[in-house]
Image (tube, helix red, strand yellow):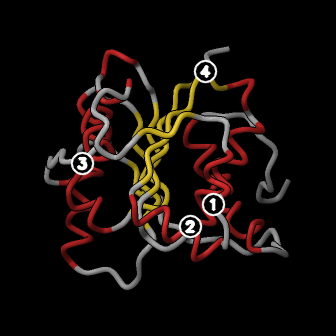
Amino acid sequence: MKKHKIVVAITGASGSIYAKVLLMKLQQLSDQIEDVGIVMSDNAKQIWKFEIGDETYKDIPYTIYGKGDFNAPFASGSAKYDTMIICPCSMGTLGRIANGISNDLTSRAADVVLKERRKLILITRDTPISLIHINNMKTVTEAGGIICPASPSFYSQPKTFEELAATVIDRVLDLIGLEHKTFRWNE
């Protein structure tokens, strides 16, 4: 079985619960994963602490790279990270990616993933969205990225915030190609 090399970028958009659930699930699926590299913006750390009430992102068993660390392995296509997930993805980050502005590690890694024709998944978390946002989403999609809005589903009858967030994250795990147990329609 091919093991995945994954980059997770966490931006300062509201929705830290999505990032937390994603990181927990990736740990549970470690037998399918070769490496996970993480980059967080300063705002992401502040929002995590505000929304979740702690700094548990510091306890994850993956390397967290600084936002300006262009020596991170996934800043180059030669490291062969096959998937990048930006969770949650701010509209500012989306705009920089759509316009090829690689001014930090997140936007550089996204640029690398797109140029190498690998998988880029942006979990956007904003509403309403403007025409500028829509056009940026179109540009990223045309470049090969996948826009996966943080729009939870309810047909699995989630009981907690984590279960609700997992309805989005489980779709992301499917997009990556990871095998996992989740609610499937009519199964």
First along the sequence among labels 2 and 3: 2
Badge number at residue 104: none
Q: Which residue is mark 2?
A: 48
The residues tagged by marks 4 and 2 sit, at their Cα atoms, a distance apart of 26 Å
Residue mark closest to the camera, 3 vs 1: 1
User: To which residue does mark 1 refer?
Assistant: 55
Determine whether the residue tagged by mark 1 lies in a helix, strand or loop: loop
Would you call the spot at circle 2 few (<14 residues within 10 Å), some (14-19), or many (20 or more)? many
**Label drawn at residue 142:** 3
SS for dot 4:
strand
Q: Nearer the viewer, mark 2 or mark 3?
A: 2
Question: For the residue labelled by badge 2, is the local secondary structure a helix, a strand or a loop?
Answer: helix
- Would you place residue 129 above or below residue 136 in this image? below
Give the residue at mark 4: 34
- Label pair 2/1, CB-CB below 8 angstroms: yes
For marks 3 and 1, give the CA distance: 36 Å
